[in-house]
Image (cartoon, coloured by chain):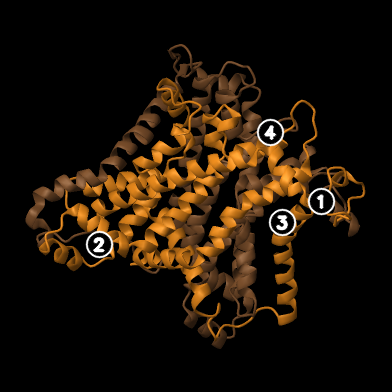
C-alpha cells in the first residue's frame, strides 16, 4: 500500500506525457514494425473511429440550428431545412448562460490559482528543503490521492454549513488554496527534483532567501509544470458537477455544469427546448476546446518533462 | 523514486535552521488542507456511519444499526450494489479492451494517424455535463441520432435509457465515448516496448496473435494493472451519468451506490436528510474500493511481467 499510490499517480501522467510528446516529435511506429492491417482497411477503421467521435458533435450543432419544433419531427432529419442562427442568441439567454459563465469563470480562475500556487509551494519544500517529516508528509499527500472524494463529502458539507459557507462559492474555491489536489503536489515535487541544486546555491550566494529563490528562480524554470497543472485544474473545476450540486442551492450562484444540467431535467412536465440547449452546449464546450488546442504545446512539453522526471 | 531531494550534508544543510522554518511556511497550506479536508472528514465520516443524523440535531450513536439496515432491511440497497457491480463488470473490461485496441490501432505508421488520435481523445477534454446531456438526446428513442442511424441501416432499435434492460448498457455506451483517456495511456505503454522484441519475433516467424500474447501483453502488463485499478475505482464512483441520464431508473436498474448516497444525504425532495445512513453507504463503497485495490495488487504477480525486482 505504501508504494502503490506513487505508481498510480505517476504512471498515467508519465504515460500520457510520453504518448502526447511522441505526437509532436516522431512518426508513431518505429520503422521496423510490421503493419498488421492493410492500408485500405486501416483507413476504413480510422474513418469509423473518427465518425463515432465527431458525428455526435456535428449532430449537436445541427440540433442547435433547428427550430424547437423541427427537433421533434418524426422521422428526424439529419440536417435542418431552415437554419435558425437566432438559437445561438436566444438559447444562451433562456439558460442564463452569461451569468453561469461568469460564475464558472470566477470559481475556476480562483481555484486554479490557489491549487497551482499552494501545490508549487508544497512541492518546493518537499523537493528542495530539508526538514523533519519531509518524507512522511510526502507519503501522506500521495496516499491521500487514493482516497475517494465521496468519503469527505458529508462531513465537509456539515462543516461548511456550520460556518455559513453553504450556498456560497467558498467550498469550491477555498480547499484549492490549501493544496487541494495531492496530484499537483506530487507533480510539482517531481519537477523540482529535476532542477540542479547548483542553481539554488548560486542564488543563495547572491543573498536570495527562499521566497526570492521560489518566485524569481524556480517559478520561471518550472513554467511547463505549472502550466500543465493549471490546465488539469481548469478541467477539474470547469467540469465539476457533484460539488456545486451539493454545495450550491440558489440558481443564481450555479456554475455552468449545474445550470446546464438543470435546464434539461424534466421540471413541471415541461419539455426542454433542445435546440436552445444544444446551441448553448456548444458554447459551454468552447473554452476547454480552445484551451486544449491552444495549449497543446505546453501540455505536451509539461507532461513530457514531468514524464521524464518520474521515469527516472 | 531513486532521487529524494537535496542530498544531505552538502551545501543546503549549512543553514538548516532557516530551511526548516521556510519549509514549514511553504508547506503549511498543504498541511492545513490535509488536516481539515482529508483527515478530519475521514474520521468524522467513520463516526457518522455509526450514528443516526439528520444534519440539524446532534448525531445519535447507534452502533452498527445503519449497516444492519443496509444489508437486511433497505429494499434499495441490494439493487444499488447490483447496479454498481453490473456497471463495473460491463464498463471496465470493455474500456480496457477498446482502449487497448484503439491504442494498437493508433500505434501504426499511417498518414493521418495523429488526427485519429486527437479525435479519439477529444471527448475526454469536453465537460462531462456537456457530453452526457448530448448523449441523453442521442439516445432519445423517437428523435435521437442513434435510433435514426440504426433505422436507416435496418438494424434493431431500442428504447435505450428508458428500458430497464438497456438502461445500464446505455450508460456504459456513454461512458465508453470517453475511452480516449484509456487509449492514451496504453499508447504510451505500447511505445515503450523495445522494438528489438518485435524484430526478434519476426525473425523467429511469430504470427500476429503470438506476438500480441507473448510480447505486447506481457510488456504492457504493469500499465494494465494500473488501468484495472484506476478504471475500477472510478467506475465504482460513477455519479454524473446515472444522475443526469436516468436518475437511477427505470426501476432500480441504474441506481448506483453514489446516486443512492446522494439521494439519502442531499436530496432536496423535502425528505429529511439521512446523513448517518448515507455515511454508512459511503463506507461500504470505500471498503469496496480498498478491496479492489488490495486484491488487484495481491494477485498482480500472477499475470504481470516485470523485468526487474522493485527496490
Q: Callout 3: helix, strand or loop?
A: helix
Q: Which residue is mark 1?
A: A84
* Residue at far left of view: B14
Q: Callout 2: helix, strand or loop?
A: helix
In space, the residues marked 1 and 3 are separated at their CA atoms by 18 Å
Residue B64 image offset from top left, x and y in percent: 47, 19
Of callouts 3 and 2, the N-terminal one: 3
Q: Which residue is mark 3?
A: A57
**Quarter containing the C terminus of chain A:** bottom left
Nearest to the eye among marks 1 and 4: give it.
1
Pointer 3 and pointer 2 on the same chain: yes
Q: Callout 4: helix, strand or loop?
A: loop
Q: What letter labels the chain drawn in brown?
A: B
Q: Does A144 sit above or below residue A271?
A: below
Q: Which color was chain A given? A: orange
Pointer 1 and pointer 3 on the same chain: yes
In space, the residues marked 3 and 2 are separated at their CA atoms by 44 Å
Work out whether residue B222 or residue A87 is closer to the camera in this orientation and state it. A87
Q: Residue at x 51, y 80 (%)?
A: A26
Residue B307 image offset from top left, x and y in percent: 39, 69
The label number, if any, that marks residue A217 in the structure image:
2
Q: Which residue is mark 4?
A: B247
Nearest to the eye among marks 3 and 2: give it.
2
In the rendered structure, the residue with mark 4 lies on which chain? Answer: B
In the rendered structure, the residue with mark 2 lies on which chain? Answer: A
Nearest to the eye among marks 1 and 3: give it.
1
Amino acid at each position: 500500500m505504501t508504494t502503490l499510490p506513487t505508481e498510480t499517480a505517476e504512471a498515467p501522467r508519465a504515460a500520457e506525457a510520453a504518448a502526447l510528446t511522441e505526437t509532436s516529435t516522431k512518426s508513431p511506429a518505429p520503422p521496423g514494425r510490421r503493419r498488421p492491417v492493410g492500408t485500405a482497411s486501416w483507413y476504413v477503421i480510422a474513418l469509423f473511429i473518427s465518425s463515432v467521435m465527431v458525428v455526435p458533435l456535428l449532430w449537436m450543432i445541427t440540433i442547435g440550428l433547428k427550430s424547437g419544433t423541427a427537433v421533434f419531427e418524426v422521422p428526424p432529419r439529419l440536417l435542418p431545412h431552415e437554419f435558425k442562427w437566432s438559437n445561438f442568441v436566444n438559447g444562451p439567454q433562456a439558460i442564463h448562460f452569461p451569468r453561469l459563465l461568469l460564475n464558472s469563470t470566477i470559481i475556476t480562475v480562483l481555484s486554479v490559482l490557489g491549487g497551482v500556487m499552494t501545490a508549487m509551494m508544497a512541492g518546493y519544500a518537499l523537493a528542495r528543503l530539508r526538514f523533519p517529516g519531509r518524507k512522511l508528509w510526502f507519503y501522506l499527500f500521495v496516499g491521500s490521492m487514493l482516497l475517494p472524494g465521496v468519503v469527505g463529502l458529508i462531513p465537509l458539507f456539515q462543516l461548511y454549513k456550520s460556518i455559513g459557507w453553504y450556498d456560497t462559492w467558498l467550498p469550491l474555491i477555498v480547499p484549492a488554496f490549501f493544496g487541494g489536489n495531492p496530484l499537483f503536489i506530487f507533480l510539482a515535487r517531481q519537477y523540482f527534483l529535476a532542477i540542479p541544486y547548483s542553481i539554488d546555491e548560486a542564488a543563495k550566494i547572491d543573498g536570495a532567501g527562499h521566497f526570492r529563490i521560489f518566485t524569481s528562480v524556480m517559478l520561471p524554470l518550472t513554467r511547463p509544470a505549472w502550466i500543465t497543472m493549471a490546465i488539469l485544474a481548469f478541467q477539474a473545476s470547469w467540469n465539476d458537477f457533484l460539488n456545486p450540486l451539493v454545495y450550491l442551492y440558489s440558481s443564481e450562484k450555479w456554475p455552468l455544469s449545474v445550470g446546464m444540467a438543470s435546464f434539461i431535467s424534466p421540471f413541471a412536465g415541461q419539455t426542454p427546448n433542445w435546440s436552445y440547449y444544444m446551441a448553448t452546449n456548444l458554447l459551454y464546450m468552447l473554452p476547454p476546446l480552445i484551451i486544449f488546442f491552444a495549449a497543446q504545446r505546453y501540455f505536451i512539453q509539461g507532461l513530457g518533462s514531468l514524464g521524464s522526471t518520474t521515469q527516472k | 523514486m531513486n532521487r529524494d531531494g537535496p542530498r544531505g550534508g552538502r551545501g543546503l544543510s549549512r543553514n538548516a535552521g532557516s530551511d526548516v522554518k521556510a519549509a514549514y511556511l511553504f508547506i503549511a497550506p498543504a498541511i492545513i488542507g490535509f488536516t481539515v479536508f482529508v483527515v478530519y472528514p475521514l474520521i468524522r465520516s467513520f463516526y457518522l456511519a455509526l450514528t443516526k443524523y439528520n444534519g440539524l440535531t446532534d448525531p445519535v450513536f447507534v452502533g452498527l444499526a445503519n449497516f444492519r439496515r443496509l444489508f437486511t432491511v433497505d429494499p434499495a440497497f441490494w439493487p444499488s450494489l447490483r447496479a454498481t457491480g453490473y456497471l463495473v463488470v460491463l464498463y471496465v473490461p470493455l474500456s480496457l479492451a477498446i482502449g487497448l485496441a484503439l491504442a494498437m490501432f493508433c500505434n501504426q505508421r499511417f498518414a493521418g494517424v495523429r488526427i485519429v488520435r486527437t479525435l479519439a481523445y477529444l471527448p475526454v477534454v469536453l465537460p462531462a455535463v456537456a457530453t452526457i446531456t448530448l448523449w441523453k438526446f442521442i439516445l432519445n428513442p423517437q428523435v435521437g441520432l442513434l435510433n435514426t442511424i440504426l433505422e436507416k441501416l435496418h438494424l434493431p432499435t431500442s428504447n435505450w435509457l428508458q428500458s430497464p434492460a438497456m438502461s445500464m448498457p446505455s450508460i456504459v455506451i456513454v461512458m465508453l465515448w470517453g475511452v480516449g483517456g484509456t487509449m492514451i495511456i496504453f499508447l504510451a505503454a505500447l511505445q515503450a516496448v523495445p522494438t528489438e522484441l518485435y524484430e526478434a519475433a519476426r525473425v523467429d516467424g511469430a504470427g500476429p496473435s503470438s506476438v500480441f500474447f507473448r510480447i505486447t501483453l506481457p510488456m504492457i502488463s504493469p500499465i494494465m494493472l494500473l488501468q484495472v485499478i484506476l478504471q475500477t475505482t472510478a467506475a465504482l464512483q460513477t455519479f454524473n451519468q446515472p444522475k443526469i441520464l436516468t436518475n437511477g431508473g427505470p426501476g432500480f436498474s441504474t441506481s448506483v451506490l453514489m446516486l443512492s448516497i446522494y439521494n439519502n444525504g442531499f436530496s432536496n425532495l423535502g425528505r429529511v436528510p439521512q446523513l448517518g445512513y448515507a455515511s454508512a453507504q459511503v463506507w461500504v463503497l470505500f471498503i469496496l474500493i480498498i478491496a479492489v485495490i488490495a486484491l488487484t495488487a495481491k494477485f498482480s504477480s500472477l499475470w504481470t511481467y516485470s523485468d526487474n525486482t522493485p527496490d
